[in-house]
Image (spheres, helix red, strand yellow):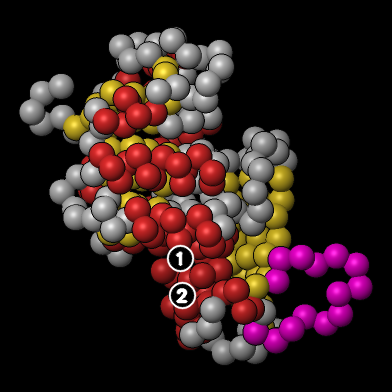
Amino acid sequence: MTGHEAGVVVTGASGRMGQTLIRLLAAGEGAPLKLVGALERPGHPWLGQDAGLAAGGPAAGVPVTDDAVEAVARARAVIDFTAPEATVGFAALVAQARAVHVIGTTGLGEGDLRRLDAAARHATIIRAGNMSLGVNLLAGLTRKVAAALGEGWDIEIVEAHHRRKVDAPSGAALMLGEAAAEGRGVRLQDVRDSGRDGLTGAREAGAIGFAAVRGGDIVGEHDVIFAGEGERLILRHVATDRAIFARGALRAAAWGLDKGPGAYDMTDVLGL
């Protein structure tokens, strides 16, 4: 690496986001970031292979490894789209290395978030349910519209993703729900409704509802529906290429290189 390059490690190298990130970095799209590590779990068939070639892109000159300690020690940034348990484990390593930890992992529980907050006392952590500019703008609009409309308007968030997605609602849907709740001055956990089935009774006033669609290769679609008497307002974002999330994560990692320890999100990165 030159003095102007910063080493980055991609966790979950064989995952859909991992592969996209590795291809972009191998093609030189991540400047000033340069791929220096690609992590996978022990026993994975990719271990030892060139990460770029394994991900279907140009050679990266970086073998896939399961040695997280060694890889993170050489990194200035780690980009992490994995699973909650893995992300919490990586957070401790990244904090020890004083590197930037960009987290796109979804499905994190309250206990996981507390451990990430603890790691953020020593490292720069940038976490977002969605890394795209459009979705983060949508969250800002959702917050403003929710604040402007009264409880006579019902809020429903409908999201759609590919059949392989394992958590629901999506991280972006929850981010939009948080924005709507903030706009109304309430806590999402107090008004969230995402389990309708059978004879549920009438909709509770002030609830923020969630519905999830899973099928095919849908990259990501999110609708925030404000339903009033005689009219509806629908805010919508449609993603057609997951590279937008990877580019957002790379942008976040580069942004965090000169930031101090703390917990940040994409609104900080984008200056929204």
* Quadrant where the N terminus is found in the figure: top left
Q: Position of residue 144 (x, y in %)?
A: 44, 78
The spot of residue 253 in percent (x, y) is: 28, 43
| Residue numbers of the magenta segment | 193-206
Q: Is residue 151 left or right of residue 112?
A: right
Amino acid type, mark 2: Arg
Q: Residue at x 23, y 44 (%)?
A: 98
Q: Residue at x 46, y 75 (%)?
A: 143
Corner quadrant of residue 21 = top left
192 vs 156, nearest the viewer? 192
In magenta stretch: residue 205: yes
- Residue 132 on the magenta segment: no
Asked if the residues shown at circle 2 and circle 1 are in contact, with their CB atoms under 8 angstroms apart, the answer is yes
Query: Which residue corresponds to mark 1?
Result: 139
Q: Which residue is mark 2?
A: 143
Q: Work out which quarter of the rendered image holds the C terminus and state it.
A: bottom left
Crowdedness of circle 2 by 10 Å Cα count: few (<14), some, many (20+)? Answer: many
Which of these two is toward me, 215 or 187? 187
Residue located at (64% from left, 41% from top): 165
Who's the residue at 58% across and 52% down the image?
A: 107
Q: CA distance from mark 2 to mark 1?
A: 6 Å
